[in-house]
Image (cartoon, rainbow, N blue to C red):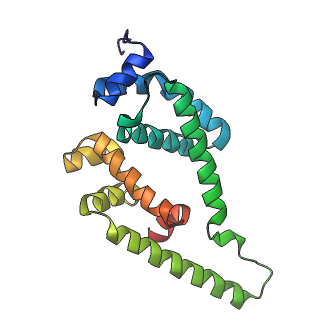
Amino acid sequence: MRKANQHKEAELVFLLKQGDKLAFEELYYRHIDKMLTFASSFLFNPSEAEEIVQIVFISVWDNRENLDPSKSFSAYLFKSIKNRILNRIRDQKKMCDLADISNEKSFDTSNIEREICLKESTQEALEIVKKMPKIQQRVFILSKVDGFSNTEIAEKLTISTRTVEHHIYKAKKSFKVNNIENYGFIILF
């Protein structure tokens, strides 16, 4: 069991801002359960909620220099998670949803629409993967195609689990930027 740290939240944020990994870890463990509960209350999908929360924590680490120790860290996390959820909902409305193609049209027309949408999405997804750095491609494929856990990937590639999480986050971000996040994985693999 983890020993509780005696630092106040503002002190931890200050240390995090300086690049202290232990301070980040302590803040993570202090807030992870609350953040997962909060995200789950909006998304009703535990894995999607966990993904959002992990993305926010990765973003906290990546942008740690901009943190203000005088402001509430938990409020910052709640706001970040809320914004990520709202962005995800907005982006999903823009997606080409194969299920929305009308089934009332003639059989041939429906198949043509589906085929065109599928070909376009497949091509976009392949282009995104080709543009990823080689290690990111490898991590992404091991995770999404081969179904390895982050720990298994880390052991297989002799990198840290955190690095694996970061590569998966960056790969998923590539799909999100191109508005094919939900279907890109399915179409490709």
Q: Residue furthest right?
A: 104
Percent across and percent down for residue 28 are 42, 27
Q: Nearer the viewer, residue 103 or 32?
A: 32
Image point (53%, 26%), residue name: 74
Horizontal arrangement in the rendering, residue 68 relative to residue 182 (left or right): left
Image point (37%, 9%), residue name: 6
Asked which quadrant contains residue 25, the reply is top left
Percent across and percent down for residue 170 are 38, 54
- Quarter of the figure with the C terminus: bottom left
Asked which quadrant contains residue 133, the reply is bottom left
Percent across and percent down for residue 88 are 59, 52
Q: Measured along the vertical axis of the image, is residue 133 above or below residue 5?
A: below
Image point (38%, 17%), residue name: 11
Image point (66%, 35%), residue name: 41
Answer whether residue 126 is visible to the viewer in this image: yes
Asked which quadrant contains residue 110, the reply is bottom right
- Quarter of the figure with the N terminus: top left
Horizontal arrangement in the rendering, residue 55 relative to residue 75 (left or right): left
Q: Measured along the vertical axis of the image, is residue 121 above or below residue 29?
A: below
